[in-house]
Image: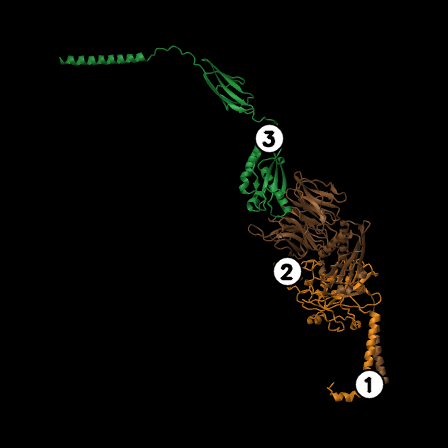
Chain colours: A orange, B green, C brown
Amino acid sequence: MAAVTNYDVYSQTGQLRRPLVWSLGLHLGFAGFVILYAVFVNGVRGTGWGGGGTGDAMGATLVSAVPLPASPTDATNVVATESKGLAKSEPAVPPKEPDAIPIPDKDVKTKLKPAPVKTATLRNKPQPEQPETNQIPYGEGGPVSGPYTMNAGGAHGGFGFTGNGGDFGERFAWYVQAVQRKVSENWLKYQVDPRVSDAKRVYITFDIARDGHPSNVEIEQSSGVPSLDISATRALQGIDTFGPLPAEYSGSKVSVEFWFDYKR
Amino acid sequence: MKHATAGMKRWSSLTVALGAILFFGACAKKVAPPAPTPPPSPTAPTASLSANPNTVDAGQPTTLTWQTTNATDVSIDGIGPVDASGTRQVTPTDSTTYHLIAKGAGGTQDATARVTVNAAATPPPVTTSNATEEELFSQNVKDIFFDYDKYDVRAADQGSLRADAAFLQQHANIHITIEGHCDERGSTEYNLALGTSRADAVKNALIQAGISGDRIKTVTMGKEKPFCTESNESCWQQNRRGHFVYER
Amino acid sequence: MNNSARRVLQRISFVALLCLLTATASAQDWIRTGTGLGVERVRLAAADFKPSNADPGNTALLKTFNDVLWNDLDNAGIFDIVSKSFYPLQEPGQPSEIIFSAWNSPPPNTSMLAFGNLAVAAGKVTVQGWLYDVKNEKSPQVLGKQYTDNATDNAVRVIAHRFADEIIFRLGGGVAGIAESKIYFVSDRGGHKEIWMMDYDGANQQQLTHLGSISLSPRISPDGSRLAFSSLVKNSWEILMYSFDLNRLVSFPRFGGTNLSPSWSPDGKIALSSARNGYPNIFVLEGSGGNWRRLTNDQGPDIAPTWNRKTGSQIAYVSGRTGLPQIYTMESDGTNVQRVTDQGYAVSPNWSPNGQFLTFSWMRKYGPGEPGSNDLYLMDIASKQWVQLTHDAGRNDFPCWSPDGRHIVFQSHRSGTDQIWSMLADGSNVKQLTFKGGNSQPNWSWK
């Protein structure tokens, strides 16, 4: 509003009183309601999904209690901002800075044709990249430390619904992390068409049985890039087991929605 | 008068000529028919006998050599009738004097040769001959050497191979084992396999040279039993070999 | 007044409705997560276990336990172990003693915490151990275990191995840990090359054979009950069999000639190199010693077969058919021979448990005047891409995969004598396991 000089404010005080009172009242009422809701329904910590390896999507703040679902973001936008996962469409969630250093993008990558991959059943560890001599520079590659397939940054934490009995992620965050790690390790990004540099997320759903074996792998939402979809599906198919479901969990299976952010 | 002198000269030269002829002819005739000598008496035979060597170790042979003349009947004690001249190999067990008798129309002649038999400096039980054989073996049978990572017999080693085959031919009772060796470089397992190939290559070459295969065994030693341990090419070459081992 | 009241009511009810809706939204057991969420290694802190009673025997056993547990977790290859210098001074021995904020924030800033206690009483030792997710205060327990055994050093060592394996199994995505696995190897420390065995970390080294000859190439069967090896018997190399059920050699047919480098398939067949047909070739026979089948048919020498442990239908081996030894693969019936290395001197292939990789020893520059050294390499079979694992570290040979596919044990001359070393499959974390005599040809158990 226009700048009002002091005497103007004083002179207008009376006109402002009623709306001011209503405004205050509503704000207080609303705030009170939110606090009550947060405390009694969701607990102080909010819902944890093990995202980011630190469960950091769940700050014990008022804001986290806003139960807006994580809408599938336009991954391009998110990635393009290079921000550490601050999803623009979800201002409600200030992510805690992940303590670990983001996985450095190994710059050794060269454009690889996916054609040389002979077998569809390639499992497990991501492959070393291929300079002409077929050799990987010392220190790069190797199957154990795996995660040079990761984006820098990338989209941030999923969180989902909680409700009656649906608190798997909260109780067994460590298992969720293990699933995350295993799928990410198994994702062979070089299988994606090398002309693609950015893509929307592909969402894959699957079930995990009690013995840890994944099944019912389906594409819930395509990224629009077929080779990306296929590479994501293969990542799941190449996994024998995530390890048995925790003994304390009483369900017979767990369903997982897993998204893949691709950026070359 | 003249006619008479010429005629007298002719008659006197003729006479002289006739007389000379007669004279010389008579001399010749005198010489031509020799007076018959009285028939000669028969020549005595000669004989010689020698032994070579005339000192031997027990069990070793020696060769007797003899020559006779004017003999119709020649014999040597202990042997019997022999030719007028000849040689014979004998193996006396003790020191012996060989006695040759040559009889002929002119008489008898004999000759002797003495052979001294040494009591063996080393008593000869059965094994001694093997020990000697083994020494001979190690002196004469040379190992075959190979190039790096190869198991074919080199041209340079063909001579050794032939000599080894010849020795084995001469000593047909000898059995051998061929060990295949490698130098220290490279992998234990691969070197065992390479050693097998080396030993077999040598065995096959010997078989080609006429040695019977059932006299030859092969075994690989890989790099497990080196002959030297320095890390240089000359030692490595020493270790890359097919090694012959004498078997009883 | 009515209007504003109505508006207020509308606003309140709108907000209330929104909250209600989300509160009762569908409650399946769903996990939603994705890539790019920081898939680095799990940060794990392993606090020293504390004594839970005052028995003087605790001290020595605790030291063994803590050392072994730390070593197992550090070696696992999947953790980012937090150094002990960052731990808070007060270390918990019971769940009630944990102060979460001391652990889940810097300096330790760990995700997982292993802790517990140990006590000796009446000749028995009891160990209680927990694994806590300290970022999840609401529901932190991942593992809680109790072990009891005789109060000996070795029993405590085994308990530590078991507990470490539990942790690794849970956090490593269902792949069993290797803390209880064994390594079989050749040692000449007694004057002759005999077969020995030891724990995966180099402890408990013990001699198995006393043959007084040369015994090489030990390979353990998939079920761990029999060990096949090759030994010089009189003048031939035979395959001998050691039984762990009976703790002695058991009979196995003698074939004469040169029989080397036995290797087990997942279903109990044996592939080996034999010169019975004149040249060393690869043969397959039943685990009982019968039913020979010939697979290669060349002058070779062919040696060192290794089976694809995942499928049992492929064999990799070494052949000198082109001169220097190279690595080949073929189907287990001998067909489809493919050459894997293109140059140099390549020997000792070993197939990874997931069927995807070969590791082998390779000297890429080879020949007179080319110094090169035998280094260990890792190759993806499908794409033939390779990675060099050791660098400028002397002669390395006989690599063998661990059952979890994360480690490789091998023989190296880098310390001046042949010794056995282990490392992670990316070449890091190299550790020496043997120190006495000359030790070679390690073979890792299958579980």
- Classify mark 3: residues with Cα within 10 Å, few (<14), some (14-19) or many (20+): some
Q: Which residue is mark 3?
A: B130
Is C382 drawn above or below residue A169 in the view shown?
above
Q: Residue at x 79, y 87 (%)?
A: A13
Check disc 2 and give the amino acid type. Answer: Gln
Quadrant location of the C terminus of chain A in the rendered image: bottom right
Q: Which residue is mark 2?
A: A130
Q: Secondary structure at mark 1?
A: helix
The reply to whether dot 2 and dot 1 touch (C-beta < 8 Å) is no
Q: Which is closer to the viewer, label 3 or label 1?
A: 1
The alpha-carbon separation of the residues under discs 3 and 2 comes to: 67 Å
Residue A130, percent across and down? Answer: 64, 60
Q: Which is closer to the viewer, label 3 or label 2?
A: 3
Residue C183, percent across and down? Answer: 71, 49
Report if residue C262 is visible in the image: no
On screen, residue B178 versus residue A70, left or right, reads: left
Q: Which is closer to the viewer, label 2 or label 1?
A: 1
The reply to whether dot 3 and dot 2 touch (C-beta < 8 Å) is no
Check disc 3 and give the amino acid type. Answer: Asn
Quadrant location of the N terminus of chain A in the rendered image: bottom right
Q: Which residue is mark 1?
A: A18
Check disc 1 and give the amino acid type. Answer: Arg
Residue A255, percent across and down? Answer: 80, 63
- Of residue B43 and residue C47, the one placed in the foreground of this image is C47
Disc 3 and disc 1 on one polypeptide chain: no
Residue A98, percent across and down? Answer: 72, 67
